[in-house]
Amino acid sequence: MSEFSRGIRGAVVRPEDAEYESARRVYNADIDRRPLLIVQCAGAADVVHCVNYARENKLLIAVRGGGHSAPGFGTCDGGLVIDLSRMKNVRVDPERRTAEVEGGCTWGDVDRATHPFGLATPGGIISTTGVGGLTTGGGFGYLSRRYGLACDNLISADIVTADGQIRTANADRNADLFWAIRGGGGNFGIAVSLEFRLHPVTQLYAGPILYPLEQAAGVLRLFRDFMRDAPREVNAFFAFLIVPPGPPFPESLHGKTVCAIMCACTGDVGKAEIVTKPLREFGPPLLALPHPMPYPFLQSLFDGLLPPGLHHYWKADFMRELTDEAIAEHVKFGPRIPTVNSAVHTYAMDGAVQDVGANETAFAYRDVRFVHIIAAVTPDPATLPLYRDWTQQYWAALHPYSAGGAYVNFLMEEGEQRIASSYLGNRERLAAIKAKYDPLNIFRVNQNIQPAK
C-alpha cells in the first residue's frame, strides 16, 4: 500500500484518516458507501496509476468527477474511488473557439473560463454538475436547441482505458471510442481531458414565468405548442415547483405550489421579448421574471436549491410528444411535488439536437421532442420513502406515453433492460466497443453496458 501511495502526486485517503468521512460523502446523501481507498488525483498520471493498481489487485473502481450521480456511481463499497475533483484546469483558445477542460471540472468552472471571451458551450442547468459525466451521457442544457448536446460539441477527449493507456479519441484517432463516449457514459474509460467547441454567448434573456396550479393543463399545452414553432434561439422547460422563500420571489408566493415555464433565449434581447410574449401574457401569470442576464448567472440560478447532502430519488423518460393524455397525468401528480428542493421538469429536446442522426453518436434518442425528470429531493431521509412512492407512481402513469427509454444521466439503478432501452439500435455496437476497450468490465460502476462475448 505504501508503494502505491508513493506513486500518487495527489492525496490518498484511507478509512483510518481524519478526512475519510468527508471524502467519502457524495452529492446524494441517500448513498452511504465505504470505499477501501479514495485517491484525489492531481493529474492524468495519478489516474493511470489508480487504474493499473485496481486492475492488478481486482479492486472495484468508482470514478468521481463532479459527483452529481444520483445513484451514487462516484463511490463504492470496498473498492477504489478515483476522485478527479482536483483536476480543474480550463484552457480557452478564443481564436479557435475551443476549450480544453480537465476531467474534474464542473460546468461552473468552464463558464467562468469561457465567459470573459463571450463564449460558451452547452452544459446542463446546474453549474455544480461535472463536465465529464454530463458529456459522456449526452448532456443537454439551456443552449441545446441552438447548439446541440454537450457531446455534439466534443471535439476530442483523452481517455484512460482499462489497460492503463491514455488514448486520444476524436474523429481521426480511435474513432470508435469517440463514438461511444458521446452518450455511452463512463463504460469505456476515464475522461481526464475534454476539448469542446465554443459558441458566441454572453447575455441571455431568461427567467421563470409562474402560473397558478389551476392553469397547469393550459400551461402545459401552451408550452408544447409554443416550443413546436419556437426559433432555435429560444429554449424553455415546464416545471411544477414550490416557490422558494426568498428573492426574487415576493413574500406572497413563498411556499406556494405553482407551475412554471423557464425560458432561456440567446441572441437579440428585443427579439426574445417579442417571441416569448405569449408565455408572459397567458393566464395571466402570477409572476414573469425573464430579463437579460449573463450566461454563468443563469447556469447557477438553481444551485442554491440543490446543495450537496440532500436525499434524492429520480425517475425519467423521453417523450416523442407531450400528448393530452400525458398532460392529464402531469396535472394529476405534479401538484403533489413534496419539497422546495424537488423538481418536476419537462425539457424540450428538438432543434439542433435533432440535426445529428441516431447512429452518429451513442446518444440514440434524436427523434424525441421532450424529456422529463421527476426528482424527489429532501433534507430529511425519513420522508424519502413516501416521496419515492410518489415519484414511482407519477412515472408509471406517464411511462405508457413515453418513447421507451430515458436519458441515462437521469437514471437511478434500474436494471439492464432499462439501460438497453435507452440506447435503442446502438446497444450492440456499444457492447462490441466495450469488449474492445474494457473486456473485463472494470468500469462497471455506472449505467453498465456488458461487453459483447
Image (tube, rainbow, N blue to C red):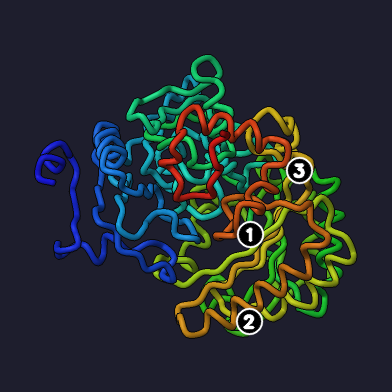
**In screen coordinates, is 311 left or right of 49?**
right
- Residue furthest to the top in view is 172
Cα distance in 3D space between marks 1 and 2: 16 Å
Which residue lies at the image location 48% right of the left edge and 45% below the top edge? 133
Which residue lies at the image location 65% right of the left edge and 66% below the top edge? 374
Label 2, residues with CA under 10 Å away: few <14, some 14-19, many ≥20: some
Q: Which of the two residues, 439 or 359, is positioned nearer the viewer here?
A: 439
Label 3, residues with CA under 10 Å away: few <14, some 14-19, many ≥20: many
Secondary element at tag 2: helix
Residue 210 spot, x, y in % from top left: 70, 70
Residue 244 spot, x, y in % from top left: 55, 76
Residue 171 spot, x, y in % from top left: 56, 18
**In screen coordinates, is 166 left or right of 316?**
left
In the rendered image, is residue 368 in sight? yes
Q: Which residue is mark 3?
A: 350
| Residue type for callout 3 | Asp
Q: Which residue is mark 1?
A: 207
Secondary element at tag 3: loop
Disc on the earlier residue, 1 or 2: 1
Q: Is residue 128 above or below residue 384?
A: above
| Residue type for callout 1 | Gly
Q: Nearer the viewer, mark 3 or mark 2?
A: 3
Cα distance in 3D space between marks 3 and 2: 32 Å
Q: Which residue is mark 2?
A: 253
Label 1, residues with CA under 10 Å away: few <14, some 14-19, many ≥20: many
| Residue type for callout 2 | Leu
Disc on the earlier residue, 3 or 2: 2
